């Protein structure tokens, strides 16, 4: 995990190998995780896939998952390296940390490839071309159908996603992630490998953080493209996002949903919105981010916080149960790890989990490569503008692939 020098408790965190692990399909995964994690006062890292909605909301989709990450996976690492601003911490179950440090010092740094696509022999692989699950017209029609659901009162806001995929594709996963980090450095980036499955993540969004008995959630809703070559236009775009009635309505609806989620596990009266409609700059876009905090009830632990807050409201909409039904009906791909969460748990039971967006997912065995992008649909949404927003969100991914 790489914070790319954004404000964080560490610069980078590297966890390798597993001395123990837990995996479970949706159904009884969260209670089983709680039982497995009990008494393990060590670092734990892993993920929650979106398809755990089958357990939390009783809603599941019918599409296959070509990437194949399990619904839930956590592991106790064999080796862990924590890079902070002025120190490096090394822990290992199997090796002497001092010996690992000597190996690191003795290693010759290997510069990353200039291109993430393997090119030996030259021109062995053509440029990557992605196929959309929706044509532009089909996407616009789906958004109009969702607006009719909103007009009827079925929901207030829904996060609607579309997939772009290619097969067969051959990439160097680590070099691709390195290029993605250069094209789109974001605070919740992650390179995550489980057997032959890879997540190459450049996420700007935090799902949930636990620090002691304090919980933090920072949903993103509201996006405006950057105009990096024109400072005045860039500043104007930032101001327009801040004053956008549509984006504010979208953001506050998700904030209310997060407040509701946290209120089920926090002390009465402790749930607060510490920042509303904050505008934050990222390489390709400005994002509207709000921060919701609360104080965890006694007797609950980190597994309880995940169970009651997942899936995150920014990737569903409101009300959560109804929009997950509509997502299953109108989307054309299984989300899998996309719009799930990846992160870590400390030995003291604190945690920090991201939202898996702005990411490539790759199955090296089947050579299936995919990314998904989405936007929040409200009654005020312009379908054309929502489609363009999806394309803007994919710019970092395509730039990392040399496109």
Image (cartoon, rainbow, N blue to C red):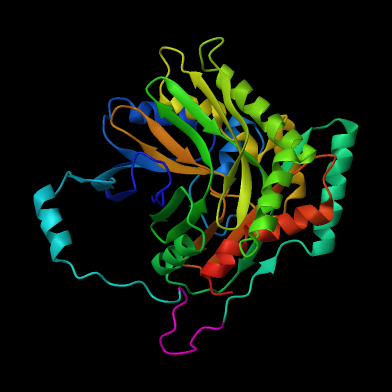
Q: How many marks?
A: 0
Pick the residue in front: 354 or 304: 354
Q: In the rendered view, would you say 198 is above or below 147? A: below
For this view, does 154 lie left or right of residue 281? right
Q: Residue at x 30, y 27 (%)?
A: 348
List x then y, in percent, for residue 4. 41, 52
| Whether residue 22 is visible | no
The residues colored magenta run 116-126
List x then y, in percent, for residue 111. 31, 72
Pick the residue in front: 346 or 180: 180
List x then y, in percent, for residue 17. 27, 51
For this view, does 72 lie left or right of residue 235? left
Pick the residue in front: 37 or 110: 110
Q: Residue at x 49, y 52 (%)?
A: 186
Q: In the rendered view, would you say 183 is above or below 61? A: below
Pick the residue in front: 222 or 339: 222
Would residue 151 be counted in the magenta stretch? Answer: no
For this view, does 348 lie left or right of residue 327? left
Residue 315 placement: quadrant = top right
| Whether residue 87 is visible | yes
Q: Residue at x 52, y 18 (%)?
A: 265
Q: In the rendered view, would you say 275 is above or below 202? A: above
In the rendered view of the protein, which quadrant contains the C terminus?
bottom right
For this view, does 131 lie left or right of residue 296? right
List x then y, in percent, for residue 385. 79, 54
User: Which residue is farthest bottom?
Assistant: 122
Residue 322 placement: quadrant = top right
Question: In terms of secondary structure, what is the magenta stretch mainly?
Answer: loop
User: Which residue is farthest front?
Assistant: 232
């Amino acid at each position: 995990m790489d914070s790319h020098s954004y404000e964080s408790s560490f610069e980078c965190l590297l966890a390798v190998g597993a001395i123990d692990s837990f995996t479970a399909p949706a159904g009884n995964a969260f209670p089983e995780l709680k039982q497995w994690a009990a008494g393990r006062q060590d670092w734990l890292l892993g993920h929650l896939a979106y398809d755990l909605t089958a357990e939390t909301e009783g809603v599941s989709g019918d599409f296959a998952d070509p990437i194949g990450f399990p619904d839930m996976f956590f592991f106790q690492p064999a080796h862990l390296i924590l890079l902070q601003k002025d120190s490096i911490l090394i822990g290992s179950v199997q090796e002497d940390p001092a010996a690992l440090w000597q190996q690191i010092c003795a290693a010759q740094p290997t510069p990353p490839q200039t291109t993430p696509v393997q090119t030996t022999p030259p021109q062995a692989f053509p440029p990557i071309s992605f196929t959309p699950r929706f044509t532009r017209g089909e996407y616009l029609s789906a958004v109009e159908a969702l607006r009719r659901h909103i007009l009827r009162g079925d929901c207030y806001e829904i996060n609607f996603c579309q997939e772009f995929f290619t097969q067969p594709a051959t990439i160097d996963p680590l070099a691709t992630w390195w290029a993605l980090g250069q094209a789109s450095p974001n605070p919740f980036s992650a390179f995550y490998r489980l057997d032959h499955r890879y997540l190459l993540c450049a996420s700007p969004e935090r799902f949930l953080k636990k620090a002691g008995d304090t919980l933090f959630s920072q949903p993103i809703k509201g996006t405006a493209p950057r105009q990096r070559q024109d400072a005045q236009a860039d500043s104007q775009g930032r101001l327009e996002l801040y004053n956008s009635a549509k984006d504010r309505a979208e953001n506050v609806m998700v904030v209310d949903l997060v407040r509701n989620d946290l209120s089920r596990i926090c002390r009465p009266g402790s749930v607060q919105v510490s920042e509303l409609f904050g505008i934050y700059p990222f390489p390709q876009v400005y994002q509207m981010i709000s921060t919701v905090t609360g104080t965890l009830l006694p007797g609950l632990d980190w597994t309880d916080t995940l169970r009651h807050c997942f899936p995150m409201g920014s990737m569903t909409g409101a009300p959560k149960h109804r929009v997950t039904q509509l997502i299953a009906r109108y989307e054309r791909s299984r989300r899998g790890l996309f719009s799930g969460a990846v992160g870590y748990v400390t030995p003291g039971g604190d945690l920090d989990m991201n939202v898996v967006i702005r990411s490539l997912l790759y199955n090296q065995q089947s050579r299936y490569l995919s990314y998904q992008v989405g936007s929040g649909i409200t009654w005020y949404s312009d379908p054309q503008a929502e489609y363009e927003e999806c394309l803007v969100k994919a710019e970092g991914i395509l730039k990392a692939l040399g496109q």
